[in-house]
Amino acid sequence: MIAGAFAIEVDDLWFSYDGNLVLRGVNLRIEHGDFLAILGPNGSGKTTFLKLLLGILTPSRGTIRIYGKEPGKIADRIGYVPQDTSVNKGFPISVLDVTLMGRLGQPGRSRRYSTADRSVAQSSLERVGMWEYRDRPIGKLSGGQRQRVYIARALTAQPDILFMDEPTASTDKEFQTELYDFLKELNESMTVVVVSHDLSVLSSYIKSVACLSQTLYHHDAAEITSEMIEKAYHCPVELIAHGLPHRVLRKHEDH
């Protein structure tokens, strides 16, 4: 962990695609060890915001700091699991080879994978329960198994912060529960940020929540107010039950 800095600092962040405003005036402070869920409807800018935090995109205006540094200057301490984990099922690459790819961005490594690289990859696969599948082609795995492997790949960077974009997309309920149990365990040693459009992530797993729809509404607790949801989802909400993965919506007025 990098001492003396917030995990995430975002100040007056704006971003546009080809003149179309996506994010405006976003501000956020997240301390190390937080478990943040970023919620919002489809098209609200969640993935764009995540790419800005990762340094994949550059802000139109404003600043981002991850542990006190620009995202592009701390990439080796960031773990990332993308939303789309689909693969060419005929491509001959093993689970172990996919996991080892997470070591490519590490400073000072040689062109070949070292014994230390392989040891970290093994430890990461064991941590997600996939070491026994190390020689299996990645395309032969189920969606949930592939997600575990991509988490292992992210963990090989030994990150201070882990970003996940829609981690439970196309997975069954059993895997979703297992995943959040595992993320809660990881959160004991690293900051976790999960991007989702699913309000069911509001559970005992997370520590804070932000609703995003161009601008961002942050609540430093594992619950959100009806005002936050109405602003983000443009939908009247009567109750978000604390710690429970469901919502109650007020009846919409007919126009």
Image (cartoon, rainbow, N blue to C red):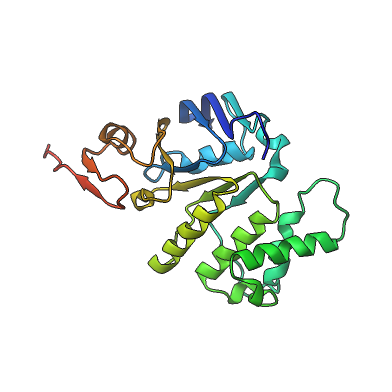
Q: How far from the left and from the top, in percent, is residue 235?
A: 25, 39
Residue at the image point whose x is 65% and y is 55% from the top: 155
Left or right: 108 as drawn, with respect to 231: right
Residue at the image point whose x is 64% and y is 33% from the top: 67
Q: Which of 4 and 231 is in front in this view?
A: 4
For the N terminus, give its image quadrant. top right
Name above or below for residue 57 compared with residue 24: below
Residue at the image point whose x is 72% and y is 44% from the top: 76
Q: Which of 76 and 19 is in front in this view?
A: 76
Q: How far from the left and from the top, in percent, is residue 199?
A: 34, 49
Q: How far from the left and from the top, in percent, is residue 47?
A: 50, 43
Q: Which of 86 and 1 is in front in this view?
A: 1
Q: How far from the left and from the top, in percent, is residue 58?
A: 62, 32
Q: In the image as oriented, which residue stretches furthest toward the left? A: 254
Name above or below for residue 105 compared with residue 24: below
Left or right: 252 as drawn, with respect to 57: left
Name above or below for residue 177 compared with residue 194: below
Note whether residue 204 is visible.
yes
Residue at the image point whose x is 60% and y is 66% from the top: 87
